[in-house]
Image: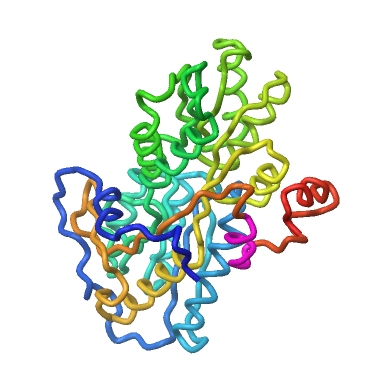
Amino acid sequence: MRRAAFAVAAGAMAVSLAACGSAKESGGSSKESGSAKKGDAIKVGLLLPENQTARYEKFDKPLIEKKVKELTNGKGEVVYANAKQDATLQNQQVDTMITNKVDVLIVDAVDSAAIKNSVQKAKDAGIPVVAYDRLAQGPISAYTSFDNKTVGKTQGEALLKALGSKAKSGKIVMMNGSVTDPNAAQFKAGAHEVLDGKVNVGKEYDTKEWKPENANSNMEGAISALGKKNIIGVYSANDGMAGGIITALKAAGIKVPVTGQDAELAGVQRIVTGDQYMSVYKPYAPEADAAAEMAVDLAQGKALDAVAKDKVDSPTTKQVPSVLVPVTALTKDNIKDTVVKDGVYTIDEICTAQYKAACDKIGLK
């Protein structure tokens, strides 16, 4: 079920997601397809970017596979590959998918610019591409993701709430995501829109490859540069990095509010214990379902109008048919009404023996 907290105007989301740029290519037509006569026996190529973030293998892949089967009466096939954070490998995987004559591709790009030529190759081979979660460059036919600028705003607003009257009493550290991920720029922009002028940013990093160990190293550097008594909070763009950040903070004897994103199990458990203040809950099922539905429609030569209600511009392609999914802030107060209610995790999965006392303390039973 969609909660009221998820209600964000689709128009606002479309504006926030639209990237500026002089497009040389027109947006993918809602009727574009390289396999217009296909029935249910279609082959969907699924390329995900990495396996360090828990969501891709645990949620995105099985959800997309399930929806494709459902939409094709069990006859559709998903051919899967994971790039393990290697853009060159992902380009090779696109080539393999083209050679294997998939009918449509769903691609979550490691590097949104580096994938451009491969997207063009797919188009030239008559294979439409659905950009998944990250806005890939090149002639994509469709796109689905979350309202990324609102994600950053949600994180910034939560951090301000946690800091309260102490917001300008010290310095915060901003740990943004990878520069190769266009979403990271949108998260950062949204966070700055909320935080600028209301906090003092002592150090800010663009974290290579989103890796927790890189965030840990950056945080150690920030502590050394700023002094542990001067740090009052940390903006972390996702939960994986938050884990590395919190390890560095604990080693220095610092406990301050830390944000996150993705509602990873470890992140939720850190929220339970109070080590992490919040995460951004992004309901994966609506995003995965939208990608599967658009992919199947494209493979079968159907229009996307019934599915894709928004339009998004990338740096290379204008007016891409898109589905933008809203998000909500996850704190210790709404774990039960979000990830538990939606079946992402059970209370038993969250409240293992190590976390039971903390769960009991916040009423998570």
Residue 271 sits above or below residue 95 on the image: above
Q: Looking at the picture, how far across and down is residue 64, in whole percent?
A: 50, 70
Q: Residue at x 45, y 58 (%)?
A: 5
Q: Residue at x 41, y 66 (%)?
A: 99
Drawn side of residue 46 relative to residue 219, left or right: left
Q: Looking at the picture, how far across and down is residue 98, in whole percent?
A: 38, 65
Q: Looking at the picture, how far across and down is residue 247, in whole percent?
A: 69, 29
Image quarter in which the C terminus is found: bottom right
Q: Is residue 6 magenta?
A: no
**Numbered marks: total:** 0
Q: Is residue 338 magenta?
A: yes
Which residue sits furthest right? 353
Q: Quadrant of residue 154?
A: top left
- Seen from the viewer's position, the closer of residues 59 and 122 is 59
What residue range appears in magenta? Answer: 335-344
Drawn side of residue 205 relative to residue 135, left or right: right
Q: Looking at the picture, how far across and down is residue 72, in whole percent?
A: 45, 85
- Seen from the viewer's position, the closer of residues 254 and 244 is 254
Drawn side of residue 88 relative to residue 243, left or right: left
Residue 196 sits above or below residue 49 on the image: above
Drawn side of residue 20 relative to residue 136, left or right: left
- Seen from the viewer's position, the closer of residues 79 and 189 is 189
